[in-house]
Each structure stands twice: as C-alpha cells, then as structure tokens.
C-alpha cells in the first residue's frame, strides 16, 4: 500500500512536466506520423495525397536506407560499448581517494561540459587540418590509407565515433560515479570481508547495485547516438559520405523536398527505441515479484 501511494504521488508531481511535454511534443509527433502516410512535398503541383504505407514500402526496397540503417546500428553499438566501458572505468577510478583526484575529475568532466559546437570544430580541424602544414599532409595520408583499406567514408566514421566516445564517456563516467556514491559504503565493506577477489566483488556486488544506473546510461548513450545529427553533419562537412538515418532523412526532406518519405525514415527508429526503453525500464524498476 505504501509503495502504491508513493507511485501515485510521484505521478501527481510529474503531471505538470508531463503535460508540458505532451503539449510541446504531441503536435510535432502527430504531424510527422500523418506526413509519413502522405506524399507531402513542396515540389508537387497538386494537393497532398494519402499514400498509406507506400513510403515505408519504398524505404524497405531502398538500398540507401539499409546502408544508413547499418551505419547507424554499427555507430550506436561501437560508441555505446566503448562509452560504457570507459565511463565505468573512470567512475571506479574517481570513487577511490587519491592525490590530485579533483584535477582528474575536472579533466574528465570538461569534455562533456564544454560546448559541443566549439569542441566539434576543434576535432574537425584536428582530423582535417584546413592549413597546409606537415601535420596536415600526415593527416591527409592517414585518411587516404584508412579509406583505401576500409572503404570510402571510413575516416568519417572513425572521426565521428571518436568524438562521440570522447564526449559520451565523460558524461557516463560522472553519471556512474554519482551512482557509486549513492550506494551505502557498508555494502562494499561487507563484500571486502566476504571475498578477497576484486573482480568477484565488482561482478557480484558493484554491477548488480549499479544496474539501474547502467540501464539509464545505456539508454542515454543510445538516444544520443541515434540523434547525433549535428556532430555527424559538422565532422563530415555536411557531406553524405557517412550516411546515418538522421543525415539521410535531412537530405531527403530539405534537399530532396520529400517530406513524406523523410518522415517515414525518421520514424523507423521509434519502434526500436521504444523496445529498448521497455527492456531497460524493466531493469531500472523490476516488478514486485522479482524484488521479492
């Protein structure tokens, strides 16, 4: 009864924010869903027509869509895995007292706190120097070698991936550090008495206690990877050499004038993200029977 009352109170407190989100998001999402079933385009010289699932059928038969989807999944999988490992390692490092920990914390925190619009320019100039120097010649040769060995667009994939990992691991590290600090230290002291193996204590005690924080960190990393349009756009100079679903939808809508297919393309992510959110929410807030 007490838990049910707390849940009702939580929903009541969240109601104003939920109402604001519904007001701000309901119309754009509804408009996008409706547009995905039409042939809306400023290039049409006739009224917009309802086409049903034709836009989705055309996407399923379009090799460019599957290439962008594969790039997006690979990009998300690589960045999430590396960010989670690095973030957890940084959190465990900062959880221990040592000389200079404040400076290390600041160095880890800065990549995420620094404006992405500024840092992404630094990354772009580092990987694609605009001024002819010996360094720019070296980086040009590196790009030629990487693209020649792994295929066109590989250098762009690596540059975008490294930037996302650099920023994202910083945020996840600070986030998981807050989770570690929220765990009563008595539990770690008991674990140290039960086992002398640091790996067993980490796997059997730290990971289960951090499961809600890890689940939320994975979802945040996933959503930022799928929605990473601005950084992909700037790091590739607006070219489609590295197409992900976000850039592909942008080119289709803004440059191609195909609002209907572009809306359908952007909505293909929704079922996947909702399924992942459901699984992670079950980890974050397990049912009563599992807790019992």
Image (cartoon, rainbow, N blue to C red):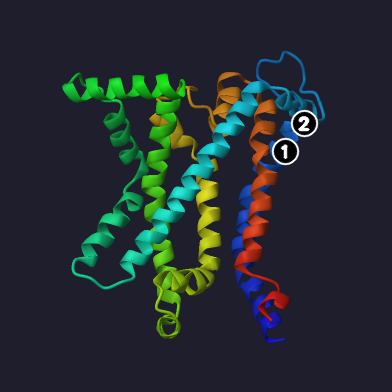
Whether tag 1 and tag 2 are in contact, CB under 8 A, the answer is yes
Residue 53 at x, y percent in the picture: 80, 30
Check the image and report above or below for 35 versus 19: above
Residue 137, picture quadrant: top left
Q: Quadrant of the N terminus?
A: bottom right
Indicate the quadrant where residue 17 lies. bottom right
Q: Is residue 96 left or right of residue 56?
A: left
Q: Position of residue 58 (x, y in %)?
A: 74, 23
Q: Which residue is mark 1?
A: 33
Residue at point 30% right, 56% down? 108
Looking at the image, residue 241 sits to the left or right of residue 8; the answer is left
Q: Is 150 in front, or is 286? A: 150
Q: Nearer the viewer, residue 9 or 66?
A: 66
Above/below status of 221 relative to 236? below
Q: Is there any visible trace of residue 227 in the rendered image?
A: no
Residue farthest to the front? 196
28 and 66: which is toward the camera: 66
Query: Where, by quadrant of the figure, is residue 281 drawn?
Result: bottom right
Residue in view at x 31 percent, y 24 percent? 142
Q: Quadrant of the C terminus?
A: bottom right
Q: Read off the residue under disc 2.
A: 37
Neighbours of disc 1 within 10 Å: few (<14), some (14-19), many (20+): some
């Amino acid at each position: 009864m007490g838990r049910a009352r707390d849940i009702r109170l939580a929903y009541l407190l969240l109601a104003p924010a939920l109402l604001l989100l519904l007001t701000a998001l309901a119309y754009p999402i509804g408009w996008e869903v409706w547009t995905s079933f039409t042939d809306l385009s400023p290039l049409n010289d006739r009224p917009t027509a309802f086409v049903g699932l034709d836009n989705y059928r055309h996407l399923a038969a379009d090799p460019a869509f599957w290439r962008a989807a594969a790039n997006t999944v690979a990009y998300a999988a690589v960045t999430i895995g590396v960010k989670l490992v690095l973030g957890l390692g940084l959190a465990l490092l900062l959880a221990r007292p040592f000389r200079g920990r404040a400076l290390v914390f600041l160095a880890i925190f800065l990549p995420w706190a620094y404006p992405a619009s500024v840092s992404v320019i630094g990354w772009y100039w580092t990987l694609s120097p605009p001024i002819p120097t010996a360094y720019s010649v070296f980086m040009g040769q590196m790009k030629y070698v990487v693209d020649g060995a792994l295929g066109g667009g590989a250098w762009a994939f690596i540059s975008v991936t490294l930037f996302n990992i650099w920023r994202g691991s910083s945020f996840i590290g600070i986030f998981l550090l807050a989770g570690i600090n929220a765990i009563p230290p008595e539990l770690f002291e008991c674990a140290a008495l039960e086992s002398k193996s640091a790996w067993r204590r980490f796997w059997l005690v730290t990971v289960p206690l951090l499961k809600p924080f890890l689940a939320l960190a994975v979802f945040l990393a996933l959503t930022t990877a799928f929605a990473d349009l601005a950084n992909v756009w700037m790091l590739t100079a607006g070219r489609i050499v590295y197409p992900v679903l976000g850039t592909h939808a942008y080119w289709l809508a803004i440059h191609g004038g195909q609002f209907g297919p572009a809306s359908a393309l952007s909505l293909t992510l929704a079922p996947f993200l909702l399924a992942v959110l459901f699984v992670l929410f079950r980890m974050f807030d397990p049912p009563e029977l599992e807790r019992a």
